[in-house]
Amino acid sequence: MPSERNVDVQELADAVRRGSPRAVARLISLVEDAAAVPGRDGVLRQVMARLATGAGGPCGARVIGLTGAPGVGKSTTTNMLIAALRGRGHRVGVLAVDPSSPFTGGALLGDRVRMRGHATDPDVFIRSMSSRGHLGGLAWAAPQALRVLAAAGCDVILLETVGIGQIEVDIARLADTTVVLLAPGMGDDVQAAKAGILEIADVFVVNKADHEGAQATVRELRTMTSVAKGPWRPPIVTTVATRGDGAGDLLTALDKHLAHLEESGEDHRRRLTRAREEIESAALARLRSRFAGPHDDRLDALARRLLAGEVDLYTAADDVIAALNRSARPTV
Amino acid sequence: MPSERNVDVQELADAVRRGSPRAVARLISLVEDAAAVPGRDGVLRQVMARLATGAGGPCGARVIGLTGAPGVGKSTTTNMLIAALRGRGHRVGVLAVDPSSPFTGGALLGDRVRMRGHATDPDVFIRSMSSRGHLGGLAWAAPQALRVLAAAGCDVILLETVGIGQIEVDIARLADTTVVLLAPGMGDDVQAAKAGILEIADVFVVNKADHEGAQATVRELRTMTSVAKGPWRPPIVTTVATRGDGAGDLLTALDKHLAHLEESGEDHRRRLTRAREEIESAALARLRSRFAGPHDDRLDALARRLLAGEVDLYTAADDVIAALNRSARPTV
């Protein structure tokens, strides 16, 4: 775990701006630390404030989310997309978020190996991020990591999530375009669990299109999307990511969705909602660090009274907030 | 969705205390509503305050968590445990939490059908809860639902989670004893993902023990637990839940863990930590409802400035907090 000490704030900010992979990695580690331990964000705040004032701001990158059940081929598809985007001259960031790996202090790296083809490319930044510490930490940390990658000059960022669930849905909301991947022949459990994921798709990819049942999956999706409400009907792209088949079609679908976002003004609306949520998460994290310190006796005393049935939960929560207001410094 | 209107607070509290299944269901629905929509908790607060003042307090129930990958037989094991606990005369609550079902407004009910054998038993309360709205909502709502079940006289509550991931780990922390279920012959993906779950086990169950490979799973677990740190080594129980085989062994393992918790004082420590976290979640939810209202122009204005790069995230968050402090009423 990197230490906050001995960090030259301006130097780190400058190195990130220059696109130093080492500096990017270090700053994202500071983000992870701050998410895991409330209040450990002194240096991070200073660096991020310096990065925020750059031309265009750090929100300028296009964020493409990739999500789907394990086994559909997300990493190979990400790999294919990296190659296609590099072919267009983009600097590409990849943030692979793995909420199912809470204890290892780093996401499962097996799949990442497949991206090694790009490991020596100075214009490709790949980072895994797992969910350390408090639930909700990831909701705060992921946008910060995106900001770091954007500040390093990545104009397209692929945001890959492992698995399907509420966290994936929340992470998907950070993306401008969400790609949902499916593969033929997945089990019933997966079909059921997909329920939540299908609704967030802007683009569908049926990967492993050379496998049996691919056309049935496409037909199923076509039926589903034909009743889609709203002005955008998610296109269905078939790929064989291991061979690079369908990369062009996928880029075209992504371009079309970007054009739709810009023409409809949805682009701005999505980014505004995201900025609101980001501020909200940051404010909550800051408040949490104030009253959830390990040595806060007031919270302990309230917890004891709650256990004893002397106070109800809501009154206890109000007491914490009242104490927070009393202790609030006039200038934060 | 139940309405807050036309609720007689005292009547609802009394009916929950009497163990009316209808009242329990209604109050848990109010919990879900409050988790989904910040600020919609007026009636809930009043009812919960009344329930909190009862003898013993609503924390009195013993909570047993059951977690494991899909397909290991959690529902049948829960079913088996319900029968065993009913045989001992307990009133049993079951809360099945499904974070992977964010949009349906109710957990997947397929598995629940297997518990129907207990549906007409007035001393068994079964409730599913999915994750609606903001991530973190479930972390707040699940303990509230446990309080409701405890207030209804359930002295043992089975807390079942669907799937494996960070949310499951967080939910498991609500339990006094966490049972991790495995079954022979699960795939590699599952093996890897288990990494986070294994560490939270107080008791292991190898279900489907009549299947090939069960003894290998047991041996693997035995090797793993033999190097366990701390005074408690998780026992390994083999079951065939569909036939009720192993129910007695599982109860014995649960009894032993309870005795260990009480003798070591760990019982009290766990409950105190939980109470702290519960107060914290409630306080954050309350703060969130103050500044995250849909019509809060200040947050919108800050979001616009963040997008334009005129302000950095941390300064924006501090502005929100400062506004919160200014607007704080002296008596909350």
Image: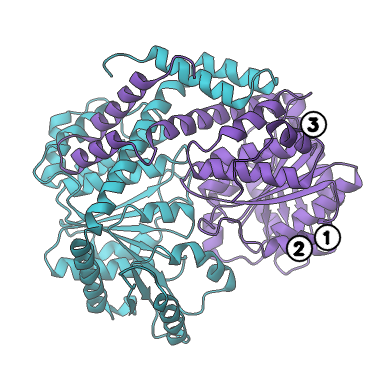
Chain colours: A purple, B cyan
Residue that carries the numbered disc 1 in the rendered image: A117
**Residue A243 pos. (x, y %):** 84, 64
- Chain bearing mark 3: A
* Mark 2 → mark 1, Cα distance in angstroms: 7 Å
Q: Mark 2 touching mark 1, by CB under 8 A?
A: yes
Q: Mark 3 touching mark 1, by CB under 8 A?
A: no
Residue type marked 2: Arg
Decide which of A241, B164 is in the foreground and name it.
B164
Relative to A17, is B205 on the left or the right?
Answer: left
Dot 3: element = helix
Query: From the viewer's perspective, is residue A187 above or below residue A284?
Result: below
- Chain bearing mark 2: A
Q: Nearer the viewer, mark 2 or mark 3?
A: 2
**Residue B119 pos. (x, y %):** 23, 59
Same chain for labels 2 and 3? Say yes or no. yes
- Residue in view at x 54 percent, y 40 percent: A34
Residue type marked 1: Gly
Residue that carries the numbered disc 3 in the rendered image: A259
**Residue A266 pos. (x, y %):** 68, 27
Query: From the viewer's perspective, is residue A189 above or below residue B218?
Result: above
Relative to B12, is B180 on the left or the right?
Answer: right
Looking at the image, the residue that sits furthest to the front is A6
Dot 1: element = helix
* Mark 2 → mark 3, Cα distance in angstroms: 31 Å
